[in-house]
Amino acid sequence: MKRALTIVSLLVALQAFADAKEARRLQACADVLHEAMGVKEQIPRDLIDKAECVAVIPGVKEGAFGFGGRFGYGAVSCRSEGGQGPWGPPLMLSLKGGSVGLQIGGQEADLVLLIMNPKGIDYLLRSKFTLGADATVTAGPVGRNAEAATDALMHAEILSYSRSRGVFAGVSLQGGTLKSDTDANFGVYGEEIPPRDLLTKSIHPVPKAAQAFIDALNKYSPRGSGWKS
């Protein structure tokens, strides 16, 4: 009996640790958004208004064994109501491999990805996809106005930004594999939920751990602009 109680207590403690870990990750996603929108050369708000989904991956790090490897963990949220409504519950993500734009300095970078059209969402619904190979990824323009970014909007499924040493800049991502983080999703929701249910149906409430991230998205872009590629 004591052994059974010990195992149950251990499982409860492990679940609490996992919940806290994912809550810290989602808070870091919110912090990156606030910092991106708070600097002079910010990610243009009109592009966020036009985005179908926004992914944030804080603290992407160099791989331990060289070869240009990178790894990071974050989350993505898509708009509800067919792209017109507020942001829905997030899907937890992992990014591994490839060249992920640490060239602007430092050994760690925050990434923000704007998914600009439904085709980009289709990639997110795969078990995994490769940036720059499966999906077209273009370095996003910076500044308060994106009127000069017409070509980027017309041709890219994803616009990408990187911040290292406090500076946000458009960055070209090549070869990184982006996929759903199944364990982290379970830690946030307490059950297995298909990515499609989170990204396209928004039938699940936003969990408490993710509220700060979703609040940040709704603060800077409460409704979509209706733009379609």
Image: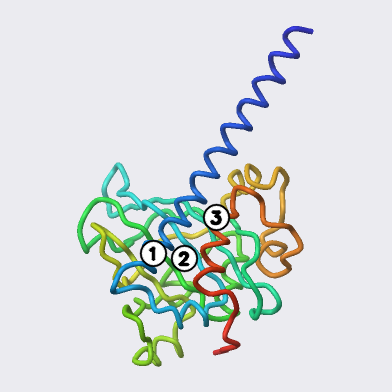
- Color theme of the render: rainbow
* Image quadrant in which you'd find residue 109: bottom left
Does residue 103 sit above or below 143 in this rendering?
Answer: above
Q: Which residue is mark 1?
A: 175
Q: Secondary structure at mark 2?
A: strand
Q: Which residue is mark 3?
A: 212
- The amino acid marked with disc number 3 is Ala
* Image quadrant in which you'd find residue 211: bottom right
Residue 229's spot in the image, x, y percent? 54, 90
Q: Does residue 64 appear to the left or right of 131 in the view shown?
A: left
Residue under the point 57% across and 70% down: 123
Q: Which residue is mark 2?
A: 130
Does residue 134 sit above or below 58 in this rendering?
Answer: below
Residue under the point 58% across and 74% down: 222
- The amino acid marked with disc number 2 is Thr
Q: Does residue 24 appear to the left or right of 77 in the view shown?
A: left
**Circle 2 or circle 3, nearest the eye:** 3
Q: Secondary structure at mark 3?
A: helix
Residue under the point 39% across and 86% down: 152
Residue 161's spot in the image, x, y percent? 36, 69
